[in-house]
Image (cartoon, grey):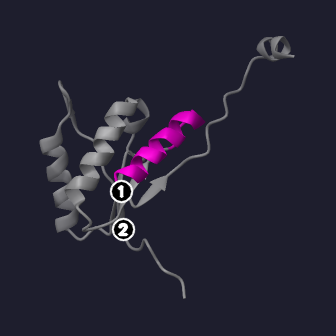
Amino acid sequence: MKNIIFKGCGTAIVTPFDDNGINFSEFKKLIEFQIENKVDAIIVCGTTGESSTMSLEEKKQAIKFCVDTVDGRVPVIAGTGGNCTESAILLSKYAESVKADALLLVTPYYNKTTQARFNRAL
Protein backbone atom coordinates (compact mmCIF):
# COMPACT_ATOMS: atom_id res chain seq x y z
CA MET A 1 0.00 0.00 0.00
CA LYS A 2 1.29 3.45 -0.90
CA ASN A 3 1.58 6.14 1.74
CA ILE A 4 -0.08 9.12 0.05
CA ILE A 5 1.51 12.33 1.29
CA PHE A 6 -0.30 14.87 -0.89
CA LYS A 7 -3.84 14.93 -2.18
CA GLY A 8 -6.43 17.47 -3.21
CA CYS A 9 -5.68 21.16 -3.66
CA GLY A 10 -2.29 22.70 -2.91
CA THR A 11 -2.26 26.48 -3.12
CA ALA A 12 0.82 28.24 -4.46
CA ILE A 13 0.53 31.15 -2.05
CA VAL A 14 1.75 34.64 -2.89
CA THR A 15 4.32 36.36 -0.71
CA PRO A 16 3.05 39.87 0.06
CA PHE A 17 5.57 42.69 0.31
CA ASP A 18 5.57 46.24 1.60
CA ASP A 19 8.29 48.90 1.72
CA ASN A 20 10.09 46.95 4.48
CA GLY A 21 10.18 43.56 2.75
CA ILE A 22 7.84 40.64 3.40
CA ASN A 23 4.58 41.80 4.95
CA PHE A 24 4.26 39.07 7.56
CA SER A 25 0.89 40.20 8.96
CA GLU A 26 -0.70 39.95 5.49
CA PHE A 27 1.17 36.72 4.80
CA LYS A 28 -0.33 35.20 7.96
CA LYS A 29 -3.83 36.28 6.84
CA LEU A 30 -3.34 34.60 3.46
CA ILE A 31 -2.11 31.38 5.06
CA GLU A 32 -4.96 31.29 7.58
CA PHE A 33 -7.53 31.97 4.84
CA GLN A 34 -6.29 28.97 2.88
CA ILE A 35 -6.39 26.68 5.90
CA GLU A 36 -9.84 27.91 6.97
CA ASN A 37 -11.09 27.12 3.48
CA LYS A 38 -9.78 23.54 3.60
CA VAL A 39 -6.76 23.69 1.31
CA ASP A 40 -4.82 20.41 1.40
CA ALA A 41 -1.30 21.89 1.19
CA ILE A 42 0.45 25.25 0.91
CA ILE A 43 3.25 25.87 -1.56
CA VAL A 44 5.52 28.71 -0.44
CA CYS A 45 8.01 30.36 -2.84
CA GLY A 46 6.33 28.45 -5.62
CA THR A 47 4.99 29.46 -8.98
CA THR A 48 3.27 32.75 -8.17
CA GLY A 49 5.97 34.87 -9.82
CA GLU A 50 7.69 36.78 -7.04
CA SER A 51 9.95 33.97 -5.85
CA SER A 52 12.22 34.31 -8.88
CA THR A 53 13.14 37.83 -7.74
CA MET A 54 13.34 37.15 -4.00
CA SER A 55 16.71 37.09 -2.27
CA LEU A 56 17.90 33.92 -0.58
CA GLU A 57 17.25 35.52 2.81
CA GLU A 58 13.69 36.50 1.83
CA LYS A 59 13.01 32.95 0.66
CA LYS A 60 14.33 31.57 3.94
CA GLN A 61 12.15 33.99 5.90
CA ALA A 62 9.06 33.11 3.87
CA ILE A 63 9.58 29.36 4.17
CA LYS A 64 10.21 29.44 7.92
CA PHE A 65 7.31 31.80 8.57
CA CYS A 66 4.95 29.62 6.54
CA VAL A 67 6.04 26.40 8.26
CA ASP A 68 5.74 28.02 11.69
CA THR A 69 2.34 29.56 10.93
CA VAL A 70 0.89 26.38 9.43
CA ASP A 71 2.14 24.45 12.46
CA GLY A 72 1.48 21.02 10.97
CA ARG A 73 -2.17 21.65 10.03
CA VAL A 74 -1.45 20.96 6.35
CA PRO A 75 1.74 20.02 4.51
CA VAL A 76 4.04 22.86 3.42
CA ILE A 77 5.84 22.45 0.12
CA ALA A 78 8.83 24.80 -0.18
CA GLY A 79 9.84 26.07 -3.60
CA THR A 80 13.62 25.77 -3.54
CA GLY A 81 14.53 25.32 -7.19
CA GLY A 82 16.32 27.81 -9.37
CA ASN A 83 18.93 28.38 -12.00
CA CYS A 84 21.86 27.91 -9.62
CA THR A 85 22.26 24.33 -8.43
CA GLU A 86 24.34 25.33 -5.41
CA SER A 87 21.69 27.83 -4.23
CA ALA A 88 18.92 25.29 -4.78
CA ILE A 89 20.77 22.74 -2.66
CA LEU A 90 21.43 25.25 0.13
CA LEU A 91 17.81 26.41 0.19
CA SER A 92 16.55 22.82 0.06
CA LYS A 93 18.68 21.89 3.07
CA TYR A 94 17.41 24.98 4.88
CA ALA A 95 13.78 24.08 4.12
CA GLU A 96 14.40 20.59 5.48
CA SER A 97 15.97 22.06 8.64
CA VAL A 98 12.87 24.18 9.38
CA LYS A 99 10.60 21.15 8.79
CA ALA A 100 9.04 21.84 5.39
CA ASP A 101 7.20 18.69 4.32
CA ALA A 102 8.42 18.62 0.72
CA LEU A 103 10.33 20.55 -1.91
CA LEU A 104 9.21 22.00 -5.21
CA LEU A 105 12.18 21.91 -7.58
CA VAL A 106 12.75 22.75 -11.20
CA THR A 107 15.44 21.52 -13.53
CA PRO A 108 17.91 24.42 -13.83
CA TYR A 109 17.13 26.49 -16.87
CA TYR A 110 19.30 26.15 -19.92
CA ASN A 111 21.60 29.13 -20.31
CA LYS A 112 22.77 29.08 -23.88
CA THR A 113 26.27 30.41 -24.33
CA THR A 114 27.49 32.33 -27.36
CA GLN A 115 29.78 30.54 -29.83
CA ALA A 116 32.62 32.96 -28.99
CA ARG A 117 32.38 32.18 -25.28
CA PHE A 118 32.21 28.46 -26.03
CA ASN A 119 35.36 28.66 -28.19
CA ARG A 120 37.26 30.47 -25.37
CA ALA A 121 36.32 27.67 -22.97
CA LEU A 122 37.99 25.12 -25.26
Q: Residue furthest bottom?
A: 1
Q: Residue at x 67, y 34 (%)?
A: 110
Q: Please tell me how crowded label 1 is: few (under 14), some (14-19), or many (20+) other residues with Cα within 10 Å.
A: some
> Residue 63, image x and y in percent?
32, 46
Give the magenta range.
Answer: 81-98
> Residue 66, image x and y in percent?
26, 51
Q: Quarter of the image for the N terminus: give it.
A: bottom right
Q: Which residue is mark 2?
A: 9
Pointer 1 or 2: first along the chain: 2
Q: Which residue is mark 1?
A: 99
How many labels sit on residues? 2
Tell me the tag on residue 15: none
> Residue 88, image x and y in percent?
52, 40
Q: Residue at x 40, y 49 (%)?
A: 95
User: How far is mark 1 from mark 2, CA to CA?
Assistant: 20 Å
Q: Residue at x 17, y 37 (%)?
A: 23
Q: Mainly helix, strand or loop, the magenta region?
A: helix
Where is 108 relative to 32, above or below? above
Inspect the image, locate mark 2, and give the three-letter code of the amino acid beneath it.
Answer: Cys
Answer with left or right where residue 50 lies relative to residue 2.
left
Where is 83 relative to 74, above or below? above
Answer with left or right where residue 58 lies relative to residue 117.
left
Q: Quarter of the image for the C terminus: give it.
A: top right
Q: Is residue 14 visible?
A: no
In the image shown, does 9 or 106 lie closer to the viewer? 106
Q: Secondary structure at mark 1?
A: loop
Mark 1 or mark 2, which is nearer to you? 1
Q: Secondary structure at mark 2?
A: loop
The image quarter in which residue 114 lies: top right
Inspect the image, locate mark 1, and give the three-letter code of the amino acid beneath it.
Answer: Lys
| Residue 90 is a magenta residue | yes
> Residue 97, image x and y in percent?
39, 50
